[in-house]
Image: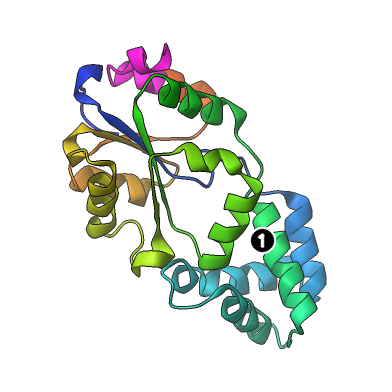
Amino acid sequence: MGSMKDERTIDAVLFDYGMVLSGPPDPAAWAEMQRLLSADGDRFHAAYWRLRDAYDRGALSGPDYWASVAGDLGRTLDAAQTEALLAADTALWTQPNPEMIAWAQALQRAGVKTGILSNIGDAMEAGIRARCPWLEAFAHHTFSHRLGLAKPDRAIYLHAAEGLGVPPERVLFIDDRAENIAGAHAAGMTTLHFTTYAEFVPEMQRLGLAGLLDL
């Protein structure tokens, strides 16, 4: 979870996007993608996740990723189906987490640097930025597909810290996945494993960072 640190040692807060600034995936979007591909849940999810890392790392474009998912399911796609899948995938991951968005905005108003570090493919970046204009207020964005890197690669955390102009040891990184938290901790960052906002507040207090909640 990171070591105890006084809030004055934190000069920037680096946020994961999915399941931190966004909420849980939209069930209606899962259902729409399965309908478009005529696939049941288990087969669809296996195909969806098999090449997701390659998509996030920029090895596949959005259309190529969906062509591969469809191929795994014995389907081919026309342009309209591809566009519909890209749109549903964006909808899946753009349900807001209002409390965390509001806190990020409070940090920004107080002059605390904020950044985004997200494993995300090219079409997903375009989709979420179109639907979430508040992302533009973050001082720096590190999107994995642009770098050919992804969490938990050490280099991606160092890239994000450099983009913020803050040494890693003065960055608080928040993510919902344990392996990503471990990677950030190894890179020297203070870390917080996000589950829910109700658990987030006492965890900030445990880390000695309650002052960042009162800006």
Residue numbers of the magenta segment: 202-215
- SS at circle 1: helix
**Magenta span includes 205:** yes
Q: Is residue 101 above or below residue 117?
A: above
Q: Left or right: where does residue 8 sit relative to residue 45?
A: left
Q: Nearer the viewer, residue 2 or 57?
A: 57
Splitting the image into 4 quarters, where does residue 64 fall? bottom right
Q: Is residue 173 above or below residue 127?
A: above
Q: According to the image, label 1 marks what residue? A: 89
Q: Left or right: where does residue 31 sit relative to residue 68?
A: right
Place of residue 152 in the rendered image (x, y in percent of width and height, measured from the top left): 31, 56
Camera sees residue 128: yes
Place of residue 53 in the rendered image (x, y in percent of width and height, measured from the top left): 45, 68
Residue type highlighted by circle 1: Asp
Quadrant showing the C terminus: top left
Main secondary structure of the magenta stretch? helix
Place of residue 185 in the rendered image (x, y in percent of width and height, measured from the top left): 23, 42
Q: Residue at x 20, y 22 (%)?
A: 5
Quadrant showing the N terminus: top left
Q: Is residue 182 above or below residue 98?
A: below
Camera sees residue 6: no
Q: Residue at x 61, y 70 (%)?
A: 48
Q: Is residue 18 above or below residue 194?
A: below
**Magenta span includes 89:** no
Disc 1 crowd, CA 10 A, few/some/many (<14, 14-19, 20+): many
Splitting the image into 4 quarters, where does residue 59 fall? bottom left
